[in-house]
Amino acid sequence: MKKLAIAVTLSAGLGLGALTGVQAALPKPPAKTDAEKTAEAEKAAAAKAKEAEQNAKAQDRAVANYKKNKGIVEPKAAKASAATTSGKK
């Protein structure tokens, strides 16, 4: 019975220690300077532009893949093929 009481006491102490460790407040980070803020804004703008470019390329590939697999003919190619068939008559 004495060993059980020791085990319960130790586990309760560990539990309370873990709880207080989780609740502890971390120190606030230092304030950013204007140079750091502008550098961060430039990085964000560059990342946004790169993402927009990649999105546009992906959309173009998706449209081309869709047209290729569905057999959709480009309007310029359709006019050219219609002109060649009408000339054969």
Image (spheres, rainbow, N blue to C red):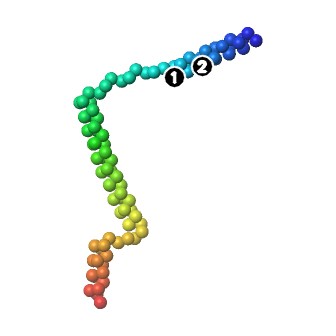
Horizontal side of 22 relative to 40 (left or right) equals right
Query: Is disc 2 in contact with disc 1, using a CB cutoff of under 8 Å?
Result: no
Which of 24/9 is in front? 24
Residue that numbered label 1 is attached to: 22
Amino acid identity at mark 2: Gly
In primary-sequence order, the first of circles 2 and 1 is 2
Residue 48: give x, y in percent of width and height.
31, 45
Horizontal side of 2 relative to 65 (left or right) equals right
Residue that numbered label 2 is attached to: 15
Residue 67: give x, y in percent of width and height.
38, 66
Picture quarter with the N terminus: top right
Picture quarter with the C terminus: bottom left
* Vertical position of residue 36 compared to residue 69: above or below: above
> Which residue is pictured at 53% across the width and 19% down the height?
20
Q: Quadrant of residue 88?
A: bottom left
Which residue lies most toward the right here? 1
> Which residue is pictured at 30% across the width and 40% down the height?
44
Rounded to the nearest angstrom, the CA distance separating label 2 from label 1 is: 11 Å
Q: Quadrant of residue 60?
A: bottom left
